[in-house]
Amino acid sequence: MSVSKLESLTGGSGVHVFLVLWKAARAVEAYAEKSILELEMCGSDFAVLEALLHKGPLPVNEIGKKVLLTSGSITVAVDRLEIKGFVERRASGNDRRARIVHLTKEGRKLITRAYADHATDMEQLASASLTRRERETLIRLLKKIGYKAAAASEQSVEEGTA
């Protein structure tokens, strides 16, 4: 590998930032998945339940946007959770065609306990790795690069449809 290619993988180059961010995200995701392993559900099911716990009842498509699942994937996840008795679909009061997803009593009990355990696990990881000030800085910097990437992606899509 040439020296210039090696240098692009170190020293804060754009590629280096991407690789470090990607590897860190994958490692943290694996750590988080272990945190919910005992629930015998996948990460997307946990994310759906967590969204409903913190945001309240939502239409299926809104849940999908919040947990970054496609329309097909979110429908499958809600179906799975409904079969297990953790969520139920109800008609919307405003639009009878719309279906709103609600936590059941059993689903609320499960996700309340599971989320508390998960939050403890995530806090242990963060506090063992970073000071409070470092966490605040990391969050600010990740938002900065994330917003920039999202804006550039949206602009590319708009230019492609124009």
Image: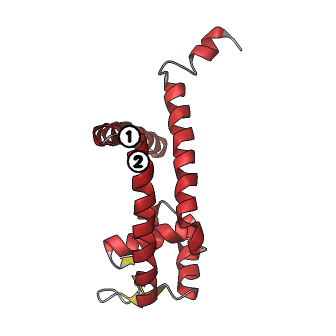
Using the rendered view, name the quadrant where residue 58 is placed.
bottom left
Image quadrant containing the N terminus: top right
Amino acid of disc 2: Ala
x and y, in percent, of residue 124 in the image: 42, 53
Q: Do the residues labelled 1 and 2 touch (CB within 8 Å)?
A: yes
- Nearer the observer, 74 or 45: 45
Residue placed under numbered mark 1 in the picture: 130
The number of callouts visible is: 2
- Nearer the observer, 16 or 39: 39
Instruction: Say few, some or many: other residues with alpha carbon within 10 Å of mark 2 (under 14 / 14 to 19 / 20 or more).
Output: some
Residue placed under numbered mark 2 in the picture: 126
Q: Is residue 71 in sight in this rendering?
A: no
> What residue do we see at 40% from left, 82% from top?
108
x and y, in percent, of residue 70 in the image: 53, 63
Q: How far apart are marks 1 and 2 (CA)?
A: 6 Å
Using the rendered view, name the quadrant where residue 15 is placed.
top right
Q: Is residue 12 above or below residue 116?
A: above
Amino acid of disc 1: Leu
- Nearer the observer, 156 or 64: 64
Image quadrant containing the C terminus: top left
Q: In this view, does 82 lie above or below 127?
A: below
Q: Is residue 108 in sight in this rendering?
A: yes
Using the rendered view, name the quadrant where residue 154 is placed.
top left
Left-right relation of 40 to 139: right
Left-right relation of 2 to 73: right
x and y, in percent, of residue 42 in the image: 59, 68
